Amino acid sequence: MTLEAQFTQALEGTVEAARTRGYIPTYFMQMLSEHGGVETARRLLAKSEPQAGLFKLWNLGILHESMEAVICDNLKYQALFTPEEIREARRRLEELNYFKKGKDHGTDI
């Protein structure tokens, strides 16, 4: 399995984690189906504002399941992205205090 396919599979896991909490990320699922994981991540990271789904995962206490966390927490996937894309993923997580006092705070914003 290619690294790109592994990344897509990891993002499919984020969808399943969200579903177990009652959240169905329809737009994200559509993008994954149409573009695969890497292109989906690139498109979402190119937007100046994080997607609403990131905040939903934060509120559900599963920020570690976000696309941004999959990128930042797994060095092997970082090879698929530019330094700017990795910085954007990290910036979004930092804004939600992901790297402070453990992970998945849910109410620290």
Image (tube, grey):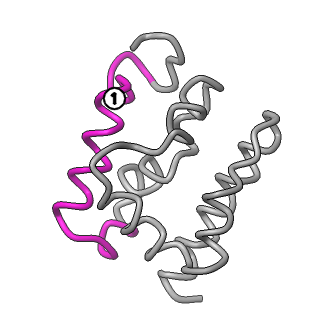
How many labels sit on residues?
1
User: Which element type, helix, strand or loop, lies under badge 1?
Assistant: loop
Q: What is the x, y in percent for residue 3? A: 48, 81
Q: What is the x, y in percent for residue 44? A: 41, 59
Is 71 rendered above or below residue 58? below
Please state if 77 lies on the left or on the right of 94 as rendered: right
Quarter that holds the C terminus: top left
Name the residue: 35% across, 23% down.
97
Name the residue: 50% across, 11% down.
107
Amino acid beneath label 1: Phe
Q: Nearer the viewer, residue 75 or 14?
A: 14
Q: What is the x, y in percent for residue 25? A: 68, 50
- According to the image, label 1 marks what residue? 99
Magenta region: which residues?
Answer: 76-102
Instruction: Report the residue that reaches farthest toward the left.
Output: 83
Q: Is residue 32 magenta?
A: no
Name the residue: 64% across, 52% down.
14
Quadrant in the picture for residue 76? bottom left
Instruction: Report the residue that reaches farthest toward the top.
Output: 108
